[in-house]
Image (cartoon, rainbow, N blue to C red):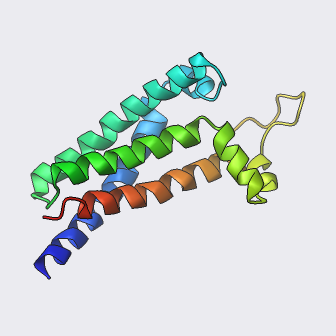
Amino acid sequence: MVGQLDSAVTFGVVLPSLLVAHNVADHWVQTSHQSGHKHLRSWTGRWNCAKHVATYTAVTAGVVGLVWAVLGLSITLVGFVAGQLVSAVTHYWADRRFMLKRLVERLGLGGFYRLGAPRTGKDDNPHLGTGAYVLDQSWHWAWLFVAALVTAVVGGV
């Protein structure tokens, strides 16, 4: 029972910590260059996405490491690394954009994905409030839930 309680408390602290770190890393730490090039289907795109995910993961690892140390959470090194890997790999996958778009289309959500996007041949309506952005962020949040769960339970304290 104590082990389960420790895992529950750890999960309850790590999840909001990851969500805060995610928002900071995705919107304040990521450079405009990375954001504008990480989706390209080339070495440039892969490199910019990798740089973004590296800084993103530095932020999430730093925040989880901080709450682990300050609050004395029951996290193992294996759980910490596994949680960060789940977050990093799934973040990279989605941020290459074309793979997430392909999944969205297969799920019949293409219309929602295109909601708010500039029309073909026009540079109108460029903003963050697009269906693509919402689906991207909800993808990240879902996987941060998994990453927090993995962090809390892998390696069993």
Residue in the picture at 42% in, 55% down: 144
Relative to residue 58, is residue 27 drawn left or right?
Answer: right
The residue drawn where x is 36% and y is 44% is: 85
The quarter holding residue 145 reads bottom left
Q: Position of residue 10 (x, y in %)?
A: 22, 64
Name the residue furthest right: 121
Q: Relative to 12, is 42 above or below? A: above
Q: Quadrant of the N terminus?
A: bottom left
Asked if 106 appears above or below 3 in the picture, the reply is above
Residue 31, x across and y down, in percent: 49, 24
Q: Is residue 30 visible in the rendered structure shown here?
A: no
Q: Is residue 37 above or below residue 157?
A: above
Front one among 62 and 5: 5
On screen, residue 90 versus residue 136, left or right, reads: left
Give above or below for 7 relative to 146: below
In the shown orientation, is residue 86 left or right of residue 140? left
Name the residue located 60 percent from the left edge and 48 percent from the top edge: 136
Q: Residue at x 9, y 58 (%)?
A: 72
| The C terminus - image quarter | bottom left
Camera sees residue 116: yes
Left or right: where 147 falls relative to 36: left
Residue 47 appears at what percent x and percent y?
51, 20
